[in-house]
Image (cartoon, rainbow, N blue to C red):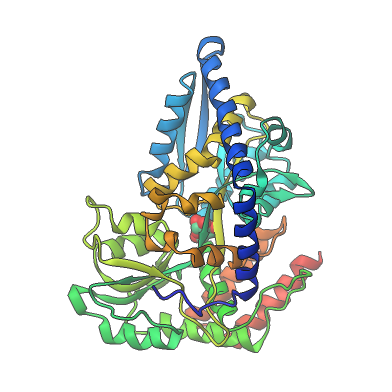
């Protein structure tokens, strides 16, 4: 496993050590805490069977190519037989899903009760009054928010209140074929070298796959390049600092990869789905995607490359390896007519039982740190079993947290895309992103 020496994890390693020490001291307490929460759910569930009315809630979520979502819904319905969960599938493209939710919620539609929210939405949805605050539920059921990775809780917190529960976390990871690759590339330059050299081995058509279409996924890929070269989009104080030599270098590296012979000629149309399809068909040596693709890679029914895939951290730029923080939360529609049943579902899906199913069946990375010690979760991939992966998750680079994120993302998508099609230089892209973001954020 090529995880060592990759990131600037010294400080994280220290806090992880402190965390681990704290856990072993108070291990009983935290176990008791989560069992307590589960126990009360069961009691309520048990009583509910006899006393409570049958209710159907609608759960909207993005396309899931893994069995994860169905499995978790099934487990919930078994435990809470009076609640039926009707699933509504939204588009795989997070931006398109976002726009459909905005249309529904801005007209105060009651149709959806619970929905999955990308980590970039809670601030906007809270501000727009689309979501129900969860604090009273969290308090009432004694949910231990400290059991979650802090960054995932923070993504659901806006103006001091909790609007979303962390369901699973994402960080960009690097996939490679173990039947082709001896040692995965340590740097972007080594990737370029190996991808051109190994393309064609074992019937592969491509050396590398990434998400380069003009959509949110392009922003996440670009932030990884920018951070790996030491650049930033906004700094700690929310100043726009994207116009830098580091960003220029990063965009130039992306241009080099996207313009190479070892990526599909239509790489500029690639989102996660295209990446996954080409990957599980055995068409590529390396790929960048989120952790869930490990589950697809080992799916006997769909994949041609079962047991031939391993994950590692992404290649390094001048500054190290970086992963963008992604992930999905669960939220409740402010106008839901079934807030109690909706919360019951949110609590289950974001709690230890639901997250374990989502990890084991769906390959998704839990937001509850303790689950990484669970042997079944560790079996999902050697990355989940590797303690350094928790550091990757915790040091993953967040996107700017702002209620106007969609506007910021549009600027980045357009400017990056124009650079990748060769219609502007990396310098122009960096300068335009800076000017347009400053104007948007200054308003
Ligand atoms: C994944 C991430 C999400 C991100 C999206 C981009 O679903 O979890 O945060 O916005 O990919 O395509």
In the rendered view, tell whether residue 18 sits above or below residue 133: below
Q: Residue furthest top?
A: 51
Q: Measuring 65% from the left and 62% from the top, which residue is drawn there?
A: 18
- Left or right position of 403 against 246: right
**Residue drawn 64% across the image and 38% down it:** 105
The furthest residue to the front: 25
Asked whether residue 294 is in view, the answer is: yes
Residue 236 is situated, as x and y percent measured from the top left of the image, at 75, 70
303 on left or right of 230: left
* Quadrant in which the N terminus appears: bottom left
**Which residue is rendered at x = 49% and y = 23% of the image?**
80
Is residue 53 positioned above or below 266 on the image? above
Quarter location, residue 100 = top right
Q: In which quadrant is the C terminus drawn?
A: bottom right
Label tally: 0
Position of residue 118 in the picture relative to residue 63 (left or right): right
Q: Closest to the observer: 414 or 322?
A: 322
Q: Where 107 sits versus 62, above or below?
A: above
Q: Position of residue 59 (x, y in %)?
A: 51, 35
Q: Can you name the residue that lies furthest to the left here?
A: 203
In front of the other: 389 or 266: 389
Q: Nearer the viewer, residue 10 or 264?
A: 10
Query: Residue 180 in the image: x percent, y percent?
Result: 24, 77
Q: Could you tell me residue 229's position as x and y percent?
A: 58, 84
Instruction: State whether residue 95 appears in this view.
Output: no
Q: In the image, 439: left or right of 86?
A: right
């Amino acid at each position: 496993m090529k995880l060592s020496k990759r990131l600037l994890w010294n400080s994280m390693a220290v806090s992880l050590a402190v965390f681990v020490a704290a856990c072993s001291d108070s291990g009983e307490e935290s176990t008791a805490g989560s069992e307590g929460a589960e126990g009360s759910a069961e009691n309520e569930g048990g009583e509910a069977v006899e006393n409570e009315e049958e209710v159907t809630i609608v759960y909207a979520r993005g396309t899931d190519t893994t069995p994860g979502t169905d499995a978790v819904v099934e487990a919930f319905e078994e435990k809470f037989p009076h609640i039926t969960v009707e699933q509504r599938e939204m588009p795989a493209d997070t931006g398109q899903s976002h726009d459909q939710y905005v249309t529904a919620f801005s007209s105060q539609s009651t149709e959806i009760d619970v929905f999955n929210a990308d980590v970039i939405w809670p601030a906007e949805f809270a501000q727009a009054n689309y979501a129900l605050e969860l604090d009273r539920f969290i308090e009432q059921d004694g949910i231990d928010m400290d059991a979650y990775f802090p960054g995932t809780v923070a993504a659901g917190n806006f103006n001091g209140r909790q609007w979303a529960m962390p369901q699973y976390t994402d960080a960009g990871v690097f996939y490679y074929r173990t039947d082709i690759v001896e040692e995965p590339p340590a740097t972007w330059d080594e990737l370029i070298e190996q991808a051109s050299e190994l393309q064609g081995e074992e019937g592969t058509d491509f050396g590398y796959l990434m998400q380069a279409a003009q959509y949110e996924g392009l922003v996440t890929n670009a932030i990884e390049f920018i951070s790996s070269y030491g650049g930033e989009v906004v700094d700690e104080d929310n100043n726009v600092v994207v116009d830098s030599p580091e960003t220029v270098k990063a965009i130039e590296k992306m241009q080099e990869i996207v313009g190479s012979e070892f990526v599909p000629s239509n790489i500029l149309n690639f989102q996660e789905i295209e990446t996954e399809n080409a990957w599980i068909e055995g068409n590529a040596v390396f790929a960048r995607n989120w952790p869930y693709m490990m589950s697809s890679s080992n799916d006997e029914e769909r994949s041609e490359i079962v047991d031939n895939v391993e994950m590692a951290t992404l290649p390094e730029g001048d500054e190290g390896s970086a992963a963008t923080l992604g992930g999905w939360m669960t939220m409740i529609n402010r106008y839901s007519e079934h807030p109690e049943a909706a919360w019951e579902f949110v609590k289950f899906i974001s709690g230890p039982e639901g997250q374990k199913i989502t990890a084991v069946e769906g390959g998704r990375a839990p937001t509850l740190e303790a689950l990484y010690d669970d042997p079944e979760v560790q079996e999902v991939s050697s990355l989940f079993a590797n303690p350094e992966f928790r550091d990757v998750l915790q040091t993953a680079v967040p996107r700017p947290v702002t209620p106007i994120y969609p506007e910021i993302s549009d600027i980045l998508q357009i400017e990056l895309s124009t650079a990748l099609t060769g219609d502007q230089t990396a310098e122009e892209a960096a300068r335009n992103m800076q000017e347009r973001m400053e104007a948007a954020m200054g308003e």
